[in-house]
Amino acid sequence: MHRRTLLAGVAMTLGLLATGAVAQEPLKVGFIYVGVPGDGGWTYQHDQARKEMEAHFGGKVVTSAIENVPEGADAERAITQLALDGNKLIFTTSFGFMDATANVAAKFPDVKFEHATGYKLAPNLSVYDARFYEGRAVIGTIAGRMTKSNKIGYIGSFPIPEVIQGINSSFIHARKVNPNVEMKIVWAYSWFDPAKEADAASALIAEGVDVILQHTDSTAPQAKAQEAGIYSFGQASDMAAYKPKPRIASIIDHWTPYYIDRVQAVLDGKWESKASWTGIKEGTVQIGEITEAVPAEVKAEAEAVQAKIADGSYHPFTGPLKKQDGSDWLADGQVATDAELQGMNFFVEGITAEYPK
Amino acid sequence: MFLLEKRPEASRLWTWGTPVLAVVATMIAGGLLFALMGKDPFLAIRAIFWDPLFGPNASYFRPQLLVKAGPLILIAMGLSFGFRAGIWNIGAEGQYVIGALCGAAVALAAYPAENLLIFPAMILAGALGGFLWGMIPAFLRIRFGTNEILVSLMLVYVAENVLSYMAHGPLKNPQGYGFPGSRNLQQYPSAHNAEVIAGTGLHWGVLAALAAVVVGHVLLNRHIFGFQIRVAGQAPRAARFAGVNPDRLVAICLGGSGALAGLAGIFEVSGPGGQITDAFNVGYGFTAIIVAFLGRLEPLGILLAGLLMALTYIGGETAQLVVGLPAAAIQAFQGMLLFFLLAFDLLTHYRIRRRRIPA
């Protein structure tokens, strides 16, 4: 090979590299899903937010996702794969990805990581979650007003703090508007299992429940509620197909504002590790349309609760509140701390169900 | 006019030819599927089969291939003996879970003591747990003549519920803020099944899988036990005359495959998995059944089949990233592999003859 052609080749390569650096490469952002977007619930909402975020940045950001990633060793590999693929910001959207995310974050200090619903932080690892209990306060209010049998049902997924917060918040606010209300709780021990969720709904209906709240992601309980002619609330996504009855309102996870915010921070070079816990005020938790099946005064009452939470004048866990065993928890006017809520492992007074061990 | 004619003996050529043919047919049919979905089939096939081995990040994926294939091979080796003898352990997934639970329980009971004996004790407990879980269908079949397919399968669901109970109850991390899941054994040096040589993916479970292949090969081809297994599968009556005790064979096959599945479980939870959680098991016990058949129930074949299965898993993730294929398409692709294998297996036992229609 002639030296001149070699040099020319080198010069050209350098030139190409230079132009590549000038024309800004789009930022690559990766996502790991525990389920598939077709679940219509948790993963669906994350996927919608991913698409809306990508559209918002119009070409400056390219996203990719790996679906159906089992928790554990497979998660670590899939997250590493995203990092190796050149993603500079990676969202891992399930609690079970926590240790895997932390492990990969330690290996890729230049990549930023965001783990949903966990608690482990690192200089390049943030956590984010939503104050779903704020939304539960709103639908709990509606549930307390709408029940005629004074029995409302709750389909729990797992007895972890996030779910316990939801149960307590719903119950407190149902009781507030209806002192006679009782709550029945059935555990599905799954986030998404239409068959188990349907069974749970049937069990509740058999116990005389006429309003069902769920902290599981499928629409199976909605279908059961429809058959039984009772009321239900959409969970994670709007579940609008069941409007106006049985689904009379819904609690929606809306991650788009957070994703846009964090991607913008990376683009600006201002990303910092933090624990973010946002709710109705920031728009992460939304209440879906309250349908005409709900009387206007009940709707107004629920919207008033929502407005007070949004402007910060009201916290759903405000004393006086006692624990299930009758011991004192919050004094009059006292507000629960975030640390207390994040470790919540008890029911409040008035719930008769046994706390799962 | 074509006729199927049973071969007097299984064709050696096709025994080994069908897996290759099945892989090729899967590539073609899968490629068509991907093309119909509007994705570039060549890019997708390359992402699945080529990139993890020779792509830009192959140095990371090659060790991962061993990590993923290790438990598959270990479990499939255990299953293959029973399958040869007509003893159907479908519940390896449950034995895998119980093995992981028993081994992890030993580690968590010892926490935070550091001692060289902890890891061996965990391994023993894991093998024992899997063995005992496998002996339940064995005992029921020997004593009451129950069907081990049903019993072992049903015990998977029992095991999963035990797992969920343990993750939420006795084995829950006391410092985990109430979240379900045990302590992470990767952060407990005495219990951590670390890579024997860093960066190679070779943890003790992979070594155990390789050892199982070697031992299995010797047993099958050089040992009287291998002979008994073969005879029992091919001619049960003849086996009795040859002095094979069918009950003993059931116990050995179910208990042994249970022990190997239990080993896979404890190696996984103490190594790549790290934690007992309610989602700890991801189907290795079921996938291993495919691996066993894909490998023709032969140790060397199982080794290759395990690696191939692992490749489709890891490559499947690459394809999601590179081509944007949904996870379901990858699962369909893996399903095709088994489908074509079973379909082409016809050629092993039958030959196609052309019959002239007399004029």
Image (tube, rainbow, N blue to C red):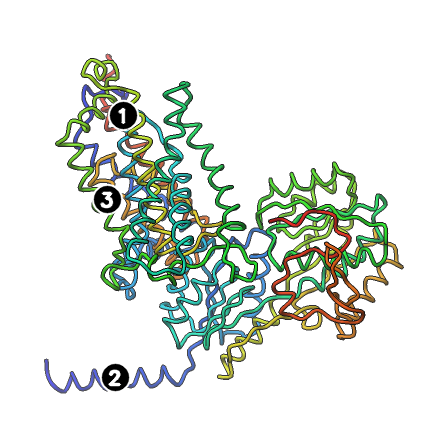
Confirm or deny contact between disc 2 and disc 3 (CB under 8 A).
no
Is disc 3 on the same chain as disc 2?
no
Q: Identify the residue under disc 2.
A: A12
Which amino acid does the dot numbered 3 rest on?
Leu
Location of residue A76 with respect to A310 vertically, above or below: above
Q: Residue at x 41, y 82 (%)?
A: A23
The image position of residue A104, as x and y in percent, is: 39, 67
Crowdedness of circle 2 by 10 Å Cα count: few (<14), some, many (20+)?
few
Q: Identify the residue under disc 3.
A: B303
Image mark 3: chain: B
Which is closer to the viewer, label 2 or label 3?
3
Which is closer to the viewer, label 3 or label 1?
1
The image position of residue B231, as x and y in percent, is: 21, 21
Q: Marks 3 and 1, how far apart in space?
A: 20 Å
- Quadrant of res A139: bottom right
Q: Residue at x 84, y 43 (%)?
A: A149
Q: Identify the residue under disc 1.
A: B85
Check disc 1 and report its element: helix, strand or loop: loop
Image mark 2: chain: A
Residue A1 is left or right of residue B206, and the answer is left
Residue B266 is left or right of residue B324, and the answer is left
Which amino acid does the dot numbered 2 rest on?
Met
Q: Quadrant of the N terminus of chain B?
A: top left
Location of residue B251 with respect to A79 vertically, above or below: above
Crowdedness of circle 3 by 10 Å Cα count: few (<14), some, many (20+)?
many
